[in-house]
Image (spheres, grey):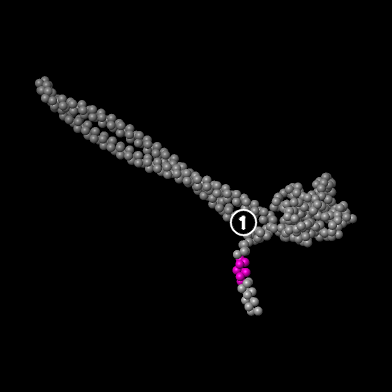
Amino acid sequence: MNKFIRFSFILILMVSLFVPSFQVEAKTVRDLKNELQKLLDENNNLNQQIKYTESQINSARSNITRLNSEIEKIQNEYAQTEKEITALNVKISEKDIEAKNLVSFLQMTNSNNFYYEYIAGAESMTDFIYRLTVTDQLLEHNKKVTVEMNDMISQNNLKKQQLTTAEKTSKSKVSELNSNLAVLGSKKSDLYEFNMSVEEEIKESQKILKMYTDAGCKDNDDISTCARLPLDTSFWRPMETGWVSSYYGWRFHPIYKENRFHDGIDLVGNRQIYSVAAGKVAAIGYNHSTMGNYIYIHHLVNNKYYTSVYLHLKSGSINVRVGDVVSKNTVLATMGSTGASTGTHLHLSIATGRRGIDYTTYSTFVSRTVDPKTLINFPSGTGSSNSWLSRTRKY
Ligand SMILES: [Zn+2]
């Protein structure tokens, strides 16, 4: 016995060790909401990054514009400096010619011939000396001016060098900015594309979330079970006993006094109303002028979705809540005469698909309605003489 207990304990321990690895953590509606929020945050973050990249692109562009105008200025200055150098060179060559002339004059004055001629025909020695002195001074002056101008030329050449360096620097900055711009541009388009896919995910995520919340799933509900409908294979009549007072199809409406399409079947009899098939309560509401108190239920019968709706229910009699799983034996409410009704009866409509999940509008619901007679066995004819006496007996 002791051995058996020990063995059992070990067996339980072994099983319990293996079980957790098969358990998948339940995903709730709140998890879906959190995932959606993460996507929205990511979207927001990406939009900010795109904006920031755009501002970087704009600043790079304005820097390029500024540098290009600086380069233009440098080039103008360079051209100006070259002009100055040319002008200085012209002046230097002029001074050169002047100097040459003066030198040739001096050579002339220095020649014996000149002295001879001058002495021979000298009129004024003072004049001669004066000329000689002035020429000397002029030569000196020319030399000085030429040196100064050469100095200016070399200064200008230096300036040219500096301008060339500055231009080079600016141009390399521009090319650097241009390559930055290319990088930023591709970064922006990458961010944009990524954000597009995030936005697609957001749309998808919102659709899925809406599907679960429309199906009545609450924040803490496990999505693998909350939206699943119980399966069924047939529809039953919604009351234990009763009869048909008005069939599905075109008819003369008792209140509106005109031909109207009757999108369901009107039933009278036992007032306790059951669900026509297993399913889940999709919506409960009240509409004063038409439906009165009503209940929508989603079904999955023979692998096909349906929505049944029960109208004119007695006020305060509704026995279920949205999201409740119901069976054929669940009492939904009591028959009444709320909304557009001339007397106590149940209006039952059945449509294909799940209203609120597969489609939303009432007009779509109406267009999808089927004749309840094709799904539920009702005795033919109307009135109490054509009553059924149980929910399942075939007629
Ligand atoms: Zn009706």
Quarter of the picture containing the N terminus is bottom right
Looking at the image, residue 275 sits to the left or right of residue 132; the answer is right
Looking at the image, residue 346 sits to the left or right of residue 5; the answer is right
What is the x, y in percent for residue 199?
A: 59, 49
Residue at 58%, 52% in the rendered image: 40
Q: Quadrant of residue 279?
A: bottom right
Q: What's under tag 1, amino acid-wise?
A: Lys
Looking at the image, residue 21 sits to the left or right of residue 350; the answer is left
Main SS of the magenta segment?
Answer: helix
Give the residue number, with chain letter if any, for mark 1.
33
- Which residue in the rendered view is the most extreme toward the top? 121
- Which residue in the rendered view is the most extreme toward the right? 385
Residue at 24%, 33% in the rendered image: 146
Residue 167 in sight: yes
Q: Magenta stretch? A: 13-20
What is the x, y in percent for residue 112?
A: 11, 25
Residue placed most toward the observer, 94 or 395: 395
Q: Magenta segment: does it hold 14?
A: yes
Residue placed most toward the observer, 119 or 36: 36
